[in-house]
Image: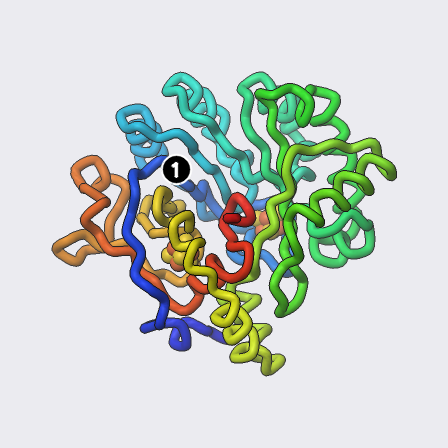
Amino acid sequence: MRETKHLLFPGTFPAISRSRLTTLQVNLGYKCNQSCTHCHVNAGPNRTEMMDDATLDLVIKYISENDIALLDVTGGAPELHPRFRQLVIEAGKAGVTVRDRCNLTILFEPQQEDLAEFLADNQVEIVASLPCYTEDTVNKQRGKGVFSLSIDALQQLNSLGYAEDSNLNLHLVFNPSGPVLPPSQMELEKEYKQRLAQDHNVQFNDLFVITNMPIQRFGSSLLSTGHFHSYMDTLRNSHQADNLETVMCKDTVSIDWQGNVFDCDFNQMLEEPLYSKDKHPLHISDLFATSLGDLPIKTGNHCFGCTAGQGSSCSGALN
Ligand code: SF4
Ligand code: SF4
């Protein structure tokens, strides 16, 4: 894979200041029942990296002792972590909403037969990638048979009240397959809702439309196909200063499976940690005694991916 990091730092992106931390995004490990070609962490069934007990205990302690509104859990398939369910229950006790980045097919894995009910019982918000409403495109990106299993999973979630009950939110994620900005989130959501209802009787709440970041596999493919600089021009030329007020690093930090702290998931992939005032990379164990407001956000040219056009974050468009 070809690296883009040296082309992103130092960048020309404006400085951003933090607001209050409200969201903790936590990666529980890289084990996954799927092995999608575009996976940014190379997750798969044979990966063994998993958050250890001590680090997971610190996550529970941190969300219990601090005013965190949202715990955004990712992986791999986070549900495969042996303590996933305990984490969800403890977050519930602390009044923290849990968002599960669910790949849908996990619902049909051995020992996960009751997962959908568990998620519904605990009012876990589900965010699921579905790169298209047609079978061919989804199977090409995510593997043979994934589309039909995803539809089965969505129907099962609907039957439990997801997308109907106001406490059971089910969101889908779209990102473009090539070096272009995504289409209007509002328009595409209408199209998805119409097609999925008509073809499969599937309902969902919101479509999160996400801009591709010029990093990892996508960045590498931009370099290999000679599109890196033109894509960066597209992002830079579409920069909307208003989006600087709502980029996700203002109120979120991202924790990797080892407990290291990053400004966002993208900086995590770029291995650019969040540094303390005395310049050591922060670990979740440091967060209890650290005032994040004083620490600068590490920006680079990839940040234009967050502010281009309608803006982009792990919750979709910003405006
Ligand atoms: S389902 Fe998600 S985590 Fe698993 S391989 Fe695919 S992209 Fe990676
Ligand atoms: S890439 Fe990360 S650090 Fe940069 S603007 Fe987006 S969320 Fe913030």
Question: Would you place residue 251 above or below residue 98 in this image?
Answer: below
Q: Amino acid at mark 1?
A: Thr
Question: Would you place residue 66 above or below residue 78 in this image?
Answer: above
Q: Residue furthest right?
A: 199
Question: Would you place residue 94 above or below residue 53 in this image?
Answer: above
Few, some or many C-alpha atoms within 10 Å of disc 1 (few <14, some 14-19, many ≥20)? Answer: many
Which residue is at a point 67% across and 27% down the rendered structure image? 163
Element under disc 1? strand
The x and y percentages for residue 254 are 38, 46
Residue 169 visible? The answer is yes
The x and y percentages for residue 124 are 54, 26
Residue 45 visible? The answer is no
The x and y percentages for residue 104 are 67, 38
The x and y percentages for residue 202 are 78, 33
Q: Residue furthest bottom?
A: 226
Which residue is at a point 28% across and 41% down the rendered structure image? 284
Number of labels in the image equals 1
Which residue is at a point 55% across and 55% down the rendered structure image? 310
Residue that badge 1 annotates: 23
Give the colouring mode of the picture. Answer: rainbow
| Quadrant assignment, res 302 | bottom left
* Residue 73 shown left or right of residue 293 in the figure: right
Question: Would you place residue 249 above or below residue 221 in this image?
Answer: above
Asked if the beta carbon under badge 1 is closer than 8 A to the nearest atom of ligand 2, the reply is no
Along the viewing direction, whichever of 297 and 107 lies nearer the viewer: 297
Which residue is at a point 52% across and 50% down the rendered structure image? 47
* Residue 234 shown left or right of residue 141 in the figure: left
